[in-house]
Image: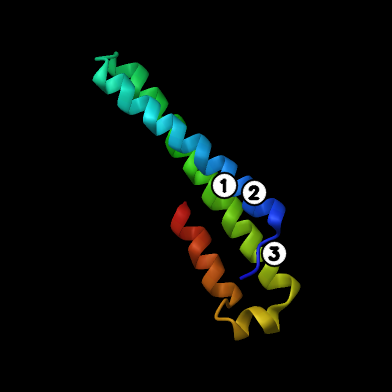
Amino acid sequence: MELPAETVDDLTKRLRRAEGQLRGVQQMLEDGRDCREIAQQLAAATKALQRTGFVLITAGLTWCLSDPERSAAEGYEVEDVQKMFLSLS
């Protein structure tokens, strides 16, 4: 599957942001911060990862639909990408 360079850049930025959020959660635990604050940050990190996955799968679906023969030849049937999308929900 070929992803546009701008999509890869966007995904990378999203993952780095989520990585920073998770490091922040680790620090909050070490600092003994309030459970509610930690849970809120975990929820934000989880949402960031989910959105990253949705962007990835959306780009994959777009690629599959733009050239279904090539995507099928490379092992990316539209149905398979749809299953990946559903696995994120």
Q: Residue at x 56, y 74 (%)?
A: 79
Q: Where is residue 45 in the image (x, y as percent from the top left)?
A: 44, 34
Report the disc number at residue 49: none
Q: Nearer the viewer, residue 8 or 64?
A: 8
Any mark on residue 62, and which? Answer: 3
Residues at badges 2 and 1 in contact (C-beta under 8 Å)? Answer: yes
Label 3: how many residues lie within 10 Å, few (<14), some (14-19) or many (20+)? some
Q: Which amino acid does label 2 sit on?
A: Asp
Q: Around disc 2, counting alpha carbons within 10 Å, would you say few (fewer than 14), some (14 to 19), or many (20 or more)?
A: few
Which structural element holds mark 3? helix
Residues 80 and 49: in front is 49
Find disc 1 in the rendering and name its residue. 12
Relative to 42, say whether 7 is above or below: below
**Residue drawn 44% across the image and 59% down it:** 87
> How was this image coloured?
rainbow
Query: Which amino acid, by three-letter code, is at mark 3?
Result: Thr
Judging from the image, what secondary structure is the residue with disc 1 in?
Answer: helix
Label 1 Cα neighbours within 10 Å, binned few <14 / some 14-19 / many ≥20: few
Task: Tell me residue 33's x, y (percent).
Answer: 29, 14
Q: Distance between the residues labelled 2 and 3?
A: 17 Å
User: How many labels were placed on the picture?
Assistant: 3
Mark 2 = which residue? Answer: 9
| Left or right of 13 in this view: 64 | right
Residue 31 coordinates in the image, percent (x, y): 27, 15
Tell me the quarter of the image containing the N terminus: bottom right
Considering only order in the chain, which callout, 3 or 1, is on the residue closer to the N terminus? Answer: 1
On the image, the x and y values in percent for residue 69 come to: 69, 84
| Residue drawn where x is 27% and y is 22% of the image | 29
Q: What residue type is labelled 1?
A: Thr
